[in-house]
Image (cartoon, rainbow, N blue to C red):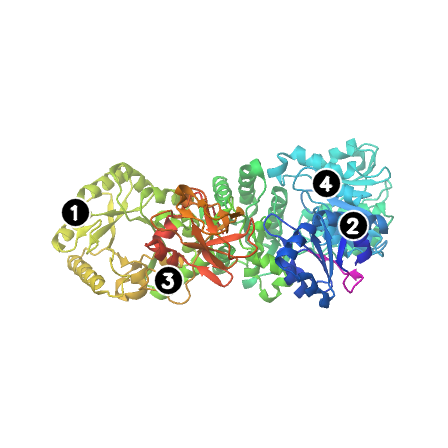
Amino acid sequence: MIPLGELIEATSARVLAPGSRDTFPGFAHDSRATQPGDCFVAVRGLHSDGHDYLDDAVERGAAALLLESARVDELATKQPGWLDALAPRGVAVLTVPDTRQALRQYASHILRRWKPQVIAVAGSAGKTTAKEAIAEVASLRAPTFRSWRNYNDLLGIPLSLGRLTPEHRVAVLEFGADHPGEIRELCEMTRPEIGVVLNVSPAHLQYFGDISTLAGELSELVRTLPPDGVAILNGLDLATRAIAEDIQTKALLFGLALNPEDHAATTEARYRSLPVTADRLCLTLQPVVANEPAGAPTGFSHLFGRQWVDSVLAAFAVAEVLDIPQEEALRTLESLQPLPGRMRWLEGIDGMALLDDSHNAIPASAAMGLNTLMSIGDTLNRPRIAALGNMLHLGDATKWAHEGLGQIAVKTTDFLIVRGAQAETVTSAARAAGMPPENVYSADTPSDVAQIVRRITQDVHSAGQAAPVVYIKGSEEMRMERVTAALLAQPERAEELLDRQTQAWRRLIVMRPDRPTWLEIDLDAIGANTRRIKEIVGPATDVLVSLKADAYGHGALRVARTTLLNGASWLGVATLSEAMPLRTAGITAQILVFGYIPPWQAREAARLDLRATVYSTDIAAELAQAARDLERTIRVHVKVDTGMARLGLRAEDVESIVRFVEELHGMRGVEVEGIFTHLATADSADQTYALRQLARFDAVLDALDSRGLRPPVIHAANSAATLTLPQSRYSLVRPGIAIYGLAPSDEVSLPAGFQPALAFKTQVAQVKDIPPGEGVSYGATYVTEHETRIAVLPVGYADGFRRAPATWGSVLIHGQEAPLIGRVCMDQCMVDVSHIPDVRRGDEVVLIGRQGEASLSAEEVARRLGTIAYEVVSALLARVPRVS
């Protein structure tokens, strides 16, 4: 509850409109989450500004707006009468210099005014769970407030405290920190009297650097307690226990199997727990009085794993401080339920059990989760699958932390699936530690992770085994709850059962890129396009996906893994150098090198088990010798030139081709696996020439067939032919551009069901007004005729954003076209935004893709540049980060 008078007093807010209400049920800072009656706080963040969404907040029922003075002045200039339009709705409007600071001022003010006893919970892992357990116990003493979900920082805690009321006599707050000094600021704002530190383990090391710095940060919670405060610390966590040795306040220690005699007289150990069984958490209360019998074991039927022990024991310690009898605390905690995404047991499809731990991940929590998976699988005699996303924000510890995860997985799970940039680190460590390679998988989308889980489940069912237990874990940006959602037995209950189900989270698709210019790659679209191709060609024809030019700019490794999981069985590359990273990453599928393999690469081609294109005896002989040197056989595909005039044996000389294939059969170390051609005009409306090429190819095949030399793999169809010439499909098709959701040409469009997979975006770096008569960019080739507002964009020809002879022409800002003016620079360009109101630094700019109702496709860009969509996307340089 937010009393209007208290808000004004705390923040010294200027009242522009008093509104029609005296109180508001709570704060909202996301217009999409605004509830009727809320006070909407317009917060400026790194990537968005709440002042841009005032209309949306009011439409959703906001009864008050807390705004920044500078932005209100801008509104008054650009939208005269905006304030008068709110009067009929009875919306209060308050202004302050800084809304974030105002929220902190309100939090401090209201806590001092209403004086609840503040209990703060900090630690590397388990904070939200412990906060919930402690709040349940504290509510036995008095009405208790708890901070909302994991709103635990300098913005989240004040937002949560908007729900505090004078009736609350205890406030349990979760403290998080991702940079030095944050815990002290939280303490200064809230003044806790009881401080709980659960553990110290690697988390946010990207900003803290090392564990000791992180431990020092968490120790600020107990160092700032008042003299009569109480520190509650995990006595078995060495870094946490060390905090107790350097504080003046009373300290209570808790921990699994913690004995009082192990510690100094200044501390008191209160609880000891029995081992954790596979299907429940089992604790025994240890009496404070020596020699008194211990209590009976107590089962916590909803809690799984060692990680729950600290939270439950911390809650018992708080009960001790608050003089709440153990028996009452016990009865309350017995019904404790895990929050969504935190070791929650759910029913999955096909009988599988899901252990959903997808809320977040650090090394310690992931290790405990994997050990719980091992225990449960052993107890229930069910196969174990670990589906893991990367652990983020670990800084220099990233590599060793993920290697450790792979090593732990070998001992704790039967099947390992890893998603994210560190997938190869984890899977390589697991294979090196002894996990069978066929049980180790990498995937790039949540849907592909779920698909692998389903395939494994089908396999174990076929082998007569019980359905597996699936452990799902990853940092929040990895969105592993989408894996859980795809595997739920009751998908209609996803919003109730899973984490991050709000509208705001559903719309958050990509992780933030390394630059303000980036590509968004929709791997789900690539997977769907691959399945669509497979549907078109049918089960008798294999699909080879062309990955040339880094998968046409989409990222070859991720595209390879995605397409192989969605219907493709072959991959194609232009050069051996394009194949090497795929093999290094563990891709074992057939890979055909379309182009020339020089002699010095022959041995490497054989070593990597690549399929080689051959069209001359000397090339074949070099490959054969390299294969023999390695005591291997290299599989080759004969290239026939039926009218493209590129690599290959001319189709008119059928007898020469037959003799060549005969020679290949006589070479030791060579296996003739395939024969192919390429169609020059399959993407034309007039396919006369393509049909002539196919007739020539068929004549070669007939001649080989008559001599018993026809290879088993025959292919000719690129994307256009796959879609329009069924007779060209033979035993294998080679789609490229269609896989990426782009049409082969203006004359051959894609059928329904294909989706473009690439969006090219940047942000506005600066907006400024240029007077008439001024030149823009190099050479001053463009001179302003009148005052012009320009936006400077951090994208240039070194990113593949064409400079000459033709340019992109325009880009999309606020759903409108903004024309390019002046020459494109290496790293920047300028666009005219005079006609687009309110363009500001940080606004999204779309170079390829959709923005609102407007779109700018790669095909349209190609028309402007006088080229084809293939070149547009393939020319996007590697320095542009790809995110998905």
Quadrant of the image containing the N terminus: bottom right
Q: Residue 334, how many percent across, how many down?
A: 76, 55
Q: Amino acid at mark 1?
A: Glu
Q: Is residue 459 above or below residue 492?
A: above
Q: Residue 609, how many percent across, how many down?
A: 33, 44
Q: Nearer the viewer, residue 303 or 10?
A: 10
Q: Would you say the magenta stretch is mainly helix, strand or loop?
A: loop
For residue 300, what is the image quadrant? bottom right
Residue at which label 2 appears: 12
What's the magenta region?
A: 18-28
Q: Is residue 635 above or below residue 219?
A: below
Q: Is residue 725 magenta?
A: no
Residue at which label 4 appears: 183
Q: Amino acid at mark 2?
A: Ser
Residue at which label 3 appears: 533
Q: Report the mark closest to the observer, 2 or 1.
A: 2
Residue 548 appears left or right of 493 = left
Q: The residue tagged with tag 4: helix, strand or loop? A: helix
Residue 722 appears left or right of 769 = left
Q: Nearer the viewer, residue 247 or 77?
A: 77
Between the C-alphas of marks 2 and 1, the distance is 91 Å
Label whose residue precedes the other's in the sequence (3 or 2) = 2
Q: Nearer the viewer, residue 200 or 509?
A: 509
Q: Residue at x 57, y 55 (%)?
A: 838
Between the C-alphas of marks 4 and 2, the distance is 26 Å
The numbered dot on residue 185 is none
Between the C-alphas of marks 3 and 4, the distance is 54 Å
Label whose residue precedes the other's in the sequence (3 or 1) = 3
Label whose residue precedes the other's in the sequence (3 or 4) = 4
Marks 3 and 4 in Cβ contact (< 8 Å): no
Q: Report the mark closest to the observer, 3 or 1.
A: 3
